[in-house]
Image (cartoon, rainbow, N blue to C red):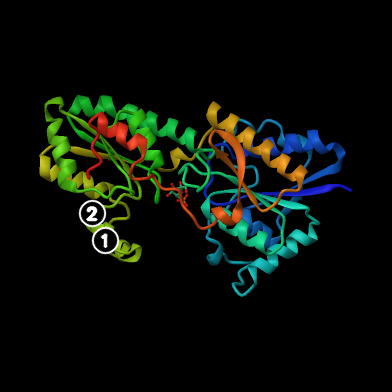
Amino acid sequence: MKRRIGILTSGGDCPGLNATIRGVAKACYEKFGEDVEIIGIHDGYYGLINGLCKEMKQSDFSGILTTGGTIFGTKRTPFKMMQVIEDDNVDKVKAMKATYKKQKLDCLLTLGGNGTHKTANLLSTEGLNVIGLPKTIDNDIWGTSVTFGFHTAVDTATDVIDRLHSTANSHGRILVAEIMGNKAGWLTLYSGIAGGADMIVIPEIPYDIEKLAEACEKRDSKGFSIMAVAEGAFDKAEAKMKKKERAKVRAEQGLTTATSRIAKQIEQMTGRETRVCIPGHMLRGGSPSAYDRVLATKFGVHAAELVAKEKYGYAVAMIKEVVSENKLVDVAGKTKFVPEDDQMVKYAKALGVSFGD
Ligand code: F6P
């Protein structure tokens, strides 16, 4: 009896998706030999709903360790908003179960972030055999100390911040870098520290613009400052608002993120020229770093081991530096934020980095 393993990638892409897929596939072919069939499901859950499936050959997994993106394609559209063959009345769960059954899958591996894990858990409670793998440059999946894609993005963001130093110095400017991360500030925190930012602004620590301006003034003799701001950062007044209200206020100000507002206010308050730099999706693109290739391989092989043990309903995770797994039900619907007393925050503050709090 052949095992039929479905794999999909869902949500925003990141470096290391292909390396993980390769890890799973190679380990499965090693373990099960001829007795395995891998089914690639295209465009995430959308493909599962619409039956976009392809039987893969072993050779399809060669040469993808170093490539960015995902060989299966992905869709970010939230599950509840998905259009199913232009017919929103289709029962999406039913459709996904039907594809799973039609493809005679023994299990489904879902590579994704928080939204993906939530849907994976839903399918698991519906009786499908599901294993989740933790992907995201945001590193915000609950229950795992690290996600693949994160460290590559840290490297890229650090390079961006590094490059801002010399130009900021030449012009005596304040350079504000907007780093991805709409809920959690891990990427900004790590790249900010690695890139020697003078101010780090993250959603978990609402900022006070006066404090940020003070920090810039304090550095005035140096002539320039580098500020790393998370895409999802908000100030203390916005912290009191509900998400919707905050979005409305921002829209009235013609803003989506706080970065340009921070730059403008800082310029007015300090009299020093500011510039904004938004690397955006560059942080999600390109080849995975060596660290992420290794991590993705470990996660992929671990998932294959779970398949061999028929241990389903779990999400692969790094727990206390050992690759392990959490129950999907425990992970679903949660976000791993930077804790207030995070050691990295403390160490950065000890260096004199301002968080604007
Ligand atoms: O979830 C990863 C992430 O890169 C976030 O940091 C960012 O806010 C979001 O995706 C951007 O998504 P999209 O590619 O849909 O614009």
Residue, far bottom: 89
In space, the residues marked 2 and 1 are separated at their CA atoms by 7 Å
Expressed as whole percent of the image width and height from the top left, the position of residue 349 reads 26, 34
State the residue position of label 2: 236
Horizontal side, residue 301 vs residue 113: left or right: right
State the residue position of label 1: 240
Residue at image coords 56%, 38%: 318
Q: How many marks?
A: 2
Residues marked 2 and 1 touching at CB (< 8 Å): yes
Q: Amino acid at mark 2?
A: Lys
Horizontal side, residue 295 vs residue 169: left or right: right
Residue at image coords 79%, 57%: 103
> Which quarter of the picture shows residue 344?
top left
Whether disc 2's CB lies below 8 Å from ligand 1 is answered no
**Quadrant of the snapshot with the C terminus:** top left
| Secondary structure of residue under mark 2 | helix
Expressed as whole percent of the image width and height from the top left, the position of residue 343 reads 36, 35
Q: Residues within 10 Å of mark 1 (few under 14, many from 20)?
A: few
Q: Is residue 51 something that shows in the picture?
A: yes
Horizontal side, residue 321 vs residue 343: left or right: right
Q: Is residue 95 above or below residue 328?
A: below
Q: Is residue 46 above or below residue 146?
A: below
